[in-house]
Amino acid sequence: MDRTTNTVFNALLNFAVGYFAGSVLKDRSTGLKAGLALGALGGVVAYAMGGRMDDEDDTFFGIDRVETRDPET
């Protein structure tokens, strides 16, 4: 997924979780508020992390990648 698709997907998923949790705990209005808050937060975090993950470097969260080789070669 590209950065924008990932952001939209995460925002919608977080909205659904917040809406469901808020609706179960209180009412529909609370579910909407919780869904919007979690959706916005999830979208912002996904967008920010998407930029970090797109960087082409040789580390993954500061850990050097290990090259694996086929034993036959």
Image (cartoon, grey):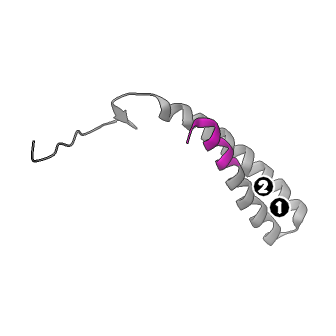
Percent across and percent down for residue 17 are: 71, 61
Within 10 angstroms of label 1, few (less than 14), some, or many (20 or more) residues? many
Residue farthest toward the left in the current orientation of the protein: 72
Measured Cα–Cα span from mark 1 to mark 2:
6 Å
The answer to whether residue 4 shows anywhere in this view is yes
Residue range highlighted in magenta: 1-11
The residue beneath circle 2 is 35
Q: In the image, what residue occupies the spot 80% across and 50% down?
A: 36
Q: In the image, what residue occupies the spot 29% across and 38% down?
A: 65
The foreground one among 51 and 70 is: 70
Within 10 angstroms of label 2, few (less than 14), some, or many (20 or more) residues? many
Left or right, residue 6 beside residue 28: left
Percent across and percent down for residue 20 are: 76, 66
Percent across and percent down for residue 3 are: 59, 36
| Residue 63 lies within the magenta run | no
What amino acid does circle 2 point to? Gly
Quick check: marks 1 and 2 in contact, CB under 8 Å?
yes
Q: Which mark is residue 31?
A: 1
